[in-house]
Image (cartoon, rainbow, N blue to C red):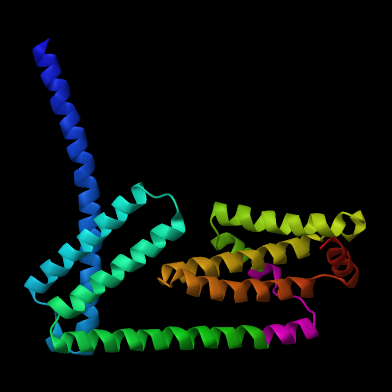
Amino acid sequence: MKSIKFILVIAALLLVYGTGFSQSTKANSKAVEKTDKLDRALKGENPTLALSESQKEQIIALQIERMNEVSAYRKNNSNKDEVKAKSKELNKVMGSKISNAILTKEQAKAQKAYRKKMKGKKERGAAKANKASKIPTRKKTMNPTTTMTNAEADKIYAAATDKQKASAEKATEKLNAKISASNASLALSDDQRKQITALNLKSLFEAAKMKKEGLSKDEIKLKNKEVVKSNKRLIKSLLTKEQKGAQKKKN
């Protein structure tokens, strides 16, 4: 009986240890990734400013400490805004420690220059995307025409995942329901359905691409807003005058 209890205790300890080890490994992996990213940024500014092994160890330790503090705070607080604010506060404290206590003056200057350069690129990119999205859409709404061929639509559809297809088709059917609610004869044609679904898929592709490129949530939100706006204009150009009128009434 005693041996069975002993085995159960050991099993419980191993389970707890295993869970903690898994979480610790994940935190270590993220910490190393972020530290390597900083190292690449510094070397990009000046190869002689690469982090030393000692600096890497200190920064990794700070990264893990910050992640553990955020995790502990999240467990005791379900308010997402408060958790976000706390995480931002801890990031600021950690960043200050890294810049002032671990990096050399030259490295700190290079880090600051890198951040300024990246911020400028993102702002210029957002401004360029915003400007580009407005110019062509105006032309298309002034001259309504077929947005793409059926072959192009088929190609886009073939590249989508089942989840993306389901989401795009759902949006198309929702539009069709609005238009045909008052008059069934105004329902979307097969060609209209195909092209509108393809346009909806292109919006989903763009959102996935921005996420893959590592853009921040605010940047994705800003660009996605322009993509959705442009997509609505293109879809509108595919509708007949009567369909547009029916859509407007339902909205």
In the rendered image, residue 217, in percent from the top left (x then y), is placed at 47, 69
In the rendered image, residue 160, in percent from the top left (x then y), is placed at 55, 60
In the rendered image, residue 18, in percent from the top left (x then y), is placed at 20, 39
Task: Reply yes or no: does residue 23 show up in magenta.
Answer: no
Of residues 94 and 140, which is closer to you in this image? Answer: 94
Image quadrant holding the C terminus, namely bottom right
| Count of labels in the image | 0
Res. 92 image quadrant: bottom left
Q: Residue at x 42, y 59 (%)?
A: 82
Task: Reply yes or no: does residue 147 show up in magenta.
Answer: yes
Q: Is residue 71 left or right of residue 103?
A: right
Magenta segment? 136-152
In the rendered image, residue 55, in percent from the top left (x then y), is placed at 11, 73
Q: Is residue 164 left or right of residue 211?
A: right
Image quadrant holding the N terminus, namely top left
Q: Is residue 229 left or right of residue 190?
A: left
Q: Could one spot residue 39 in this view of the protein?
A: no
